[in-house]
Amino acid sequence: MDPPSKLSNGDEEELPTPIVSFLGPISSYTHQAALGSFEADRYDYRPEITIPDVFDSVQSGEAALGVVPFENSTNGAVVFTLELLADRHHRYPDITVCGEAYFDVSHCLVGRKCAMSTTDSPVMSGACTPTMSTPAPLKPRTSPLHSVKHVKRLLSHPQAFGQCETFLGAYLKGVERIDVSSTSRAAEMVKEDTTGTSAAIASKLAAEIHDIDILARGIEDREDNTTRFFVLRKGTDVSACKSSKTKTLISFTIDHRTPGALASVLQCFQIAALNLTSINSRPTKVVPFQYIFFVEFEGSRLNDPTGRVNKALGALGEYVQHWRWLGSWDDKLGE
Ligand SMILES: O=C(O)C(=O)C[C@]1(C(=O)O)C=C[C@@H](O)C=C1
């Protein structure tokens, strides 16, 4: 992906290297996805602590691009990102999605090997034995490489917990879980814990960087576990969407009292023969149980040779209270 174009401020003056901000610290999956998406020597990479920090850095113009997780194939939407795209307080009026990246996510349980129990069998749970409360327990895809009996607390990003439920249910049932801002932050905190009783769900790279032990590998519920990341920018690059496969994201609100209001909006896409690729919603936080909807579909507003995208977007105004185009980009699924 090319850096967003800048206004030239002089013939000979060298422009600063554009910054790509990402959910850090370094070695997060978001970092790894960002490194795989751009030519490394054209950008400076800057880790941010939270997803809102990435949005802020792009909206303020400090970062030319920002990379955030959007959804996972096993555990669904990343609500933190949807919340910011909902932009209820108009803090991110200029942010658009200009790209996406898919990254195969294989989690490790990382921590400290327990010195006292090196001879213990690492398999120490009867979780696969049917019980009254769990008559058909799921079988984890892997078992620990080392004992995990000493683990008293487990840290990770909430998305990662949701991707490893079978392993956690079998080997770390009842262990306290602590949500942190990213998997790599969790690995960092495990490193800082001198008791050696904390463990994290994080990447192999995070274990290597923080010099902590891998207690189990491949602990995700599904082998095809994949996370999709969005690339954000400020404003629009009208020359974007070069591929023949593109996607667009919009958000909208409807009058919930009108029967069929949502169906009427979706019909605009059906009439224009546009395939929908995802639908999400978040509460409006204005009226309880009313929603901001997000619809993603195939096609680009910026490169629309058949005019179908602009036709659908033109038609939906009749059925929504408010809508916002959140970006169009090249579809990377399957590449
Ligand atoms: O990038 C990271 O390491 C994160 O912690 C975020 C995140 C996510 O929110 O989906 C990224 C990839 C994995 O799906 C798990 C966690």
Image (spheres, grey):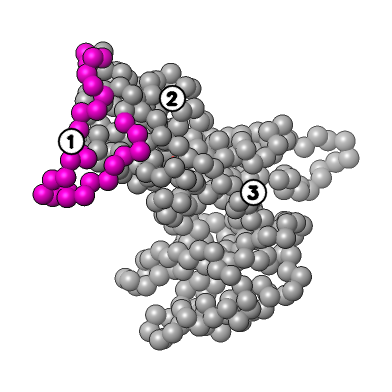
Point 43% across, 18% down: residue: 211
Point 16% across, 45% down: residue: 130
Query: For the residues carrying marks 3 and 1, which lies nearer the camera in this image?
Result: 1
Q: Which mark is residue 126?
A: 1
- Spot the residue most to the left: 132
> Helix, strand or loop at disc 3?
loop
Query: For the residues carrying marks 2 and 3, which lies nearer the camera in this image?
Result: 3
Give, as a single range, the part of the protein colored magenta: 116-143
Pointer 3 local density, CA inside 10 Å: few below 14, some 14–19, many at least 20 = few
Of callouts 1 and 2, the N-terminal one = 1
Instruction: Locate residue 96 relative to residue 192 in the image: left or right.
Output: right
Point 48% across, 66% down: residue: 279
Query: For the residues carrying marks 1 and 2, which lies nearer the camera in this image?
Result: 1
> Helix, strand or loop at disc 1?
loop
Closest to the observer: 40 or 75? 75
Determine the CA span between mark 2 and mark 3: 28 Å
| Residue to which mark 3 is pinned | 335
| Residue to which mark 2 is pinned | 207
Instruction: Locate residue 40 relative to residue 252 in the image: left or right.
Output: right
Determine the CA span between mark 3 and mark 1: 41 Å
Point 29% across, 42% down: residue: 139
| Mark 1 touches mark 2? (CB < 8 Å) | no
